[in-house]
Amino acid sequence: MPTKNPRLNVVLEPPVYNVLNVLAHRKGISLSLLARDLIKEALEIYEDLYWQRVANLREKTFSYKKALSHKDIWE
């Protein structure tokens, strides 16, 4: 069946391929679907790590003296 989505070819070591194959079989899904889902999950983890670094940097420079209160913001 033709698809409009871009395709990606990946070369895996045999042990990695075997684990993916077993997992896909257990879940009753294709290798491609499992790989896609795992890549999406990995990207979400990378995004979370990025935003955690941003939050940590902001936390270091945060000052309660300069911060606006809830009341100040809603007035």
Image: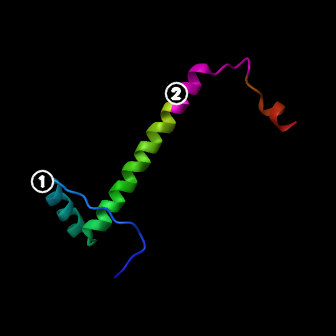
Residue 14's x, y, as percent?
11, 56
Up-down: is 50 above or below 34? Answer: above
- Quick one: label 1 or label 2, which is nearer the N terminus? 1
Where residue 8 sits, quadrant-wise, is bottom left
Q: In the rendered image, which quarter contains the C terminus?
A: top right
Label annotation for residue 49: none
Residue 29's x, y, as percent?
28, 71
Residue 51's x, y, as percent?
51, 38
Residue named by callout 2: 56
The boundaries of the magenta stretch are 54-66
Q: Residue furthest bottom?
A: 1
Is 31 left, or right, of 55 in this rendering?
Answer: left
Look at the numbered discs 1 and 2 and tell me whether their residues touch, using CB distance below 8 Å.
no
Most common secondary structure along the magenta stretch: helix
Q: In the rendered image, which quarter contains the N terminus?
A: bottom left
Three-letter code, disc 1: Pro
Is 70 left, or right, of 6 in this rendering?
Answer: right
Residue named by callout 1: 15
Is 27 left, or right, of 22 in this rendering?
Answer: right
x 18%, y 64%: residue: 21
